[in-house]
Image (cartoon, helix red, strand yellow):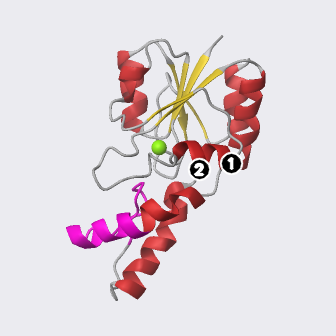
Amino acid sequence: MSKIAIDIDNTICDTSDFFGPIAENYDRNVLHKNNIINYDKIVPRSDNWSKEELAYFIENYFNKESINIPIKEDAVIYINKFKELGYEIIFITNRGIKDDDYTDLIVPEYLEKNNIPYNSIITKSNDKYMYLDDVDYFIDDAIRNCEEALEKTNTKVIMMETSKTKDYENNKIFKTSSWKEIFNYITR
Ligand SMILES: [Mg+2]
């Protein structure tokens, strides 16, 4: 049966939107600053934060709160439909790739908490294309991951559209912000 590899952050859950206000709160009320927070990062932050300030945020907010990132409700519905149809579901994330990021450890707990079925999980994967040899479909929001998968594998690439990629166009990549459309595309 077909295999689907799925990214986590900003693909099945709204990581940046969840942590943006938390980063702002940390900046205002803990650091007592008034920095602009960059929401485009998986760990939203200010470019003015020192290394130590960012490390504190990752340790005390990002690592601790990532279990509470809201899941996309339609992701739950359609990933369960894939599972019912017999598709193999692999989650592939670069979480844990940095020494101070421990959010890879809670991935199984997070998926189970949100009723997301899976067959396997790959973490710390900076070069996701390397894991796509026998994968039929790859779903990710990051341009680099999608383009590398397109260039270096035979996997069909689906881009989860975010505010970052709304103007991105590539006729070889199916781009959508809807899990229903992803389901229809794969099962068509
Ligand atoms: Mg992502």
Between 1 and 158, the residue placed more toward the observer is: 1
Q: Is residue 114 above or below residue 184?
A: below
Name the residue at 27% across, 68% down. 47
- 52 lies left or right of 109: left
Upstream in sequence: badge 2 or badge 1: 2
- Range shown magenta: 37-60
Which picture quadrant has residue 187?
top right
Secondary structure of the residue carrying tag 2 is loop
Callout 2: few (<14), some (14-19), or many (20+) C-alpha neighbours within 10 Å?
A: some
Closest to the observer: 75 or 152? 75
Residue 155 percent across, percent down from the top left: 49, 16
Q: Does 78 appear above or below 25?
A: above
Nearest to viewer (mark 2 / mark 1): 1
Label for residue 114? 1
> Type of residue at label 2?
Cys
Q: Residue at x 37, y 46 (%)?
A: 96
Pointer 2: what residue?
Answer: 13
Is the C-beta separation of discs 2 and 1 under 8 Å? Answer: yes
The local secondary structure at tag 1 comes to: loop
Q: Is residue 92 left or right of residue 185?
A: left
Whether label 1 lies within 8 Å of ligand 1 gets the answer no
- Residue 11 visible? The answer is no
Seen at 63% across and 14% down, the residue is 2
